[in-house]
Image (cartoon, helix red, strand yellow):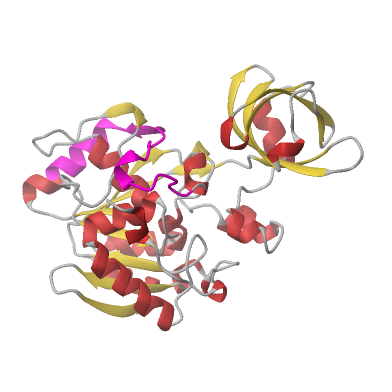
Amino acid sequence: MDLALFDYELPPDRIAQYPAERRDASRLLVLDRATGRWEDRVFAELPALLRAGDCLVVNDSRVIPARLPGTLPGGAQVELLFLRELAPGRWEVLARPAKRCRPGAVIVLADVEARVVEAGAEGRRVVEVSGVGSARDFLERHGLPPLPPYIRRHRKPGAEDWERYQTVYARHDGSLAAPTAGLHFTPALMDQLRAGGVEVHALTLHAGPASFRPIRAAEVEKHPMPAEQVAVTEAVARAVNRARGDGRRVVAVGTTVVRALEWASDPNRRVSPVSGFADLFIYPGHAFKVVDALITNFHLPRYTHLLLVSAFAGRELVLAAYRHAEAAGYRFYSYGDAMLVL
C-alpha cells in the first residue's frame, strides 16, 4: 500500500497552537460510517451522542515533562527528550539538533551536566547525567511538557500547557505525548456521561517517541511499529467483554485505546487482562475485533494515527471528512478539534 495515499494538504493556520478556551468547547465532527455523512457539533454535546450502556474506554497515561533545554560549551542551544532510563544516571534521549550532540559532548541541563556517551540513529543518544538523585524528580523540577514539533516551532511551552497537555483523568506516569482525544473531557462532562448511563473504564498505554515521527517507508506494510507499554486490567477486560456480550457499544477514546484493546483481544474477540509491549500496527485491511466507535483528533498525514482512523472508517471517507473540516475552519492536531466516528 502506497504511503502517498495518506497525504493531504493543510494550511498552516489550521494547526492549533493553543488549546481551546475550555476543554469541551472544542468542535466535534460526527462521522457516520454507515451512511458516509457527517455533522458539525460541539464536544460538550457528547452525552447526547452516546447511549446509555455504552462502554467508554479512556487512556489514563500521564505525560511526563521529559523535554529539557541544554547548553553546549560555547553557548550553542540543544534540546533533549528523555526516553527511558537504561541504568541509574544513564538515559536514552532524542537530541535536537543531533549533529551537535556527538559522543564526548557535555551538555548543561539546569544545574547538572549530561555527557553524550553513544550515538544512535534518528537523533538517539545515550547520555550519563551526574548528581541528579531521582531522575523522575529531576524531570518534574526542570523538564518541560513535550509539546509536538509543530507547536514548539512557533512558541515555547507556557503555564497553561502544564495543565492542558494532560487529560483530567491522567494517573500513571509514562507518556511522551498526550493521548489527545482525551484532552476535550472535563470532570463535569465525565460526570454527565456516567449520569446518562455510560460506563467509563481506563486502561494505560504510554505513548512513545513514535508519536513525533512520520512513517518513512514508501510502502505502508514495511513500517516497523515501535512497541509501547500497555496495561489492561482484569476489570477493564471484563467490562469490555460484558458490553460486547450484551450488544452494547465499545467506544474508544483515542487511537492509543484502539491499539491497546485490539492488541489485547483474541481471535474470538475477547479482551484479556494483559501487561506488556504492544507493537500492533493498524492500517487499512485490519479486521477490528473489539471497538465499535472512536473519538479521535485530526491527525498528521503519513502518521500511524491517520492510518488507524482510515482503517476504521475508510480512507476516502476520512480524507473527505478532513477536507470538510479544513474548509469549515476546524483546528487540527494535538490541541485541535475532535471527531466522533460511529
Query: In the image, residue 160 lies at what x, y percent?
Result: 65, 60
In the picture, measured across the screen, residue 229 lies left or right of residue 31, that is: right
Name which residue lies at 52% across and 63% down.
335
Q: Which residues are magenta?
A: 214-242
- Based on the displayed image, in which of its 4 quarters is residue 317 positioned? bottom left
Residue 42 seen in this snapshot: no
Name which residue lies at 74% across and 33% down.
101
Residue 223 sits inside the magenta stretch: yes
The mark total stands at 0
Name which residue lies at 63% across and 42% down.
65
In the picture, measured across the screen, residue 19 lies left or right of residue 259, that is: right
Task: Give whichever of 168, 223 is nearer the camera.
Answer: 223
In the picture, measured across the screen, residue 13 lies left or right of residue 152, that is: left
Query: In the image, residue 269 lies at what x, y percent?
Result: 12, 39
Name which residue lies at 68% across and 46% down.
144
In the picture, measured across the screen, residue 97 lies left or right of residue 120, that is: right
216 lies above or below 190: above
Residue at the far top: name it.
87
